C-alpha cells in the first residue's frame, strides 16, 4: 500500500488518480487473502459515489489523509493537495 500511494502521489501511475490529481488516502481496508481484497475492490467499484462517500464518512469523517506521515518531510516528488 505504501508503494502504491507513493506512485500515485508522484504521478507515475496513469489513470484516474493522475488525471484528477488524487493524492490523499482517506480509506483503506486490510485483507490477509489477495482474492478477498480483489473481491472487495470490485464490490466498491460497483457502488455509487454516494455510498462510497458514506463509507468514508463513517471511518474518517474529516477526510484526513491517512498516509500523511508515511513519508519524510524531504519526500520531494510528493505533492500535497489541500
Image (cartoon, grey):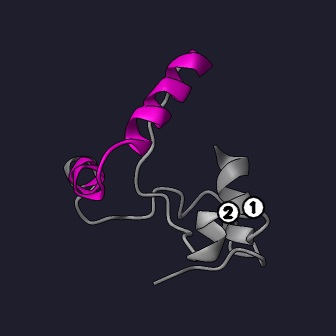
Is the residue 35 above or below the residue 81 in the image? above
Front one among 59 and 15: 15
Identify the residue under disc 1: 13
Front one among 35 and 33: 35
Q: For label 2, count other residues whose C-alpha is less than 10 Å away and answer few (under 14), some (14-19) or many (20+).
A: many
Tell me the quarter of the picture where residue 78 sits. bottom right
Is the residue 34 above or below the residue 56 in the image? above
**Left or right side of 17 for 50:** left
**Which region shows up in magenta?**
32-56
Front one among 11 and 48: 48
Q: CA distance from mark 1 to mark 2?
A: 6 Å
Is the residue 63 above or below the residue 37 in the image? below
Tell me the quarter of the picture where residue 72 sits. bottom right
Q: Residue at x 26, y 57 (%)?
A: 53
x and y percent of residue 48 in the render? 29, 52
Front one among 40 and 6: 40
Q: In the rendered structure, are the residues bearing label 1 and label 2 in contact, judged by CB atoms less than 8 Å apart?
A: yes
Amino acid at each position: 500500500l505504501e508503494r502504491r500511494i507513493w506512485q500515485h502521489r508522484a504521478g507515475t501511475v496513469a489513470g484516474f488518480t493522475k488525471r484528477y490529481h488524487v493524492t490523499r488516502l482517506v480509506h483503506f481496508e486490510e485483507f490477509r487473502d489477495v482474492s478477498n481484497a480483489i473481491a472487495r475492490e470490485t464490490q466498491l467499484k460497483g457502488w455509487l459515489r454516494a455510498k462510497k462517500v458514506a463509507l468514508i464518512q463513517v471511518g474518517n469523517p474529516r477526510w484526513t489523509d491517512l498516509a500523511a506521515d508515511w513519508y519524510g518531510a524531504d519526500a520531494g516528488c510528493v505533492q500535497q493537495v489541500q
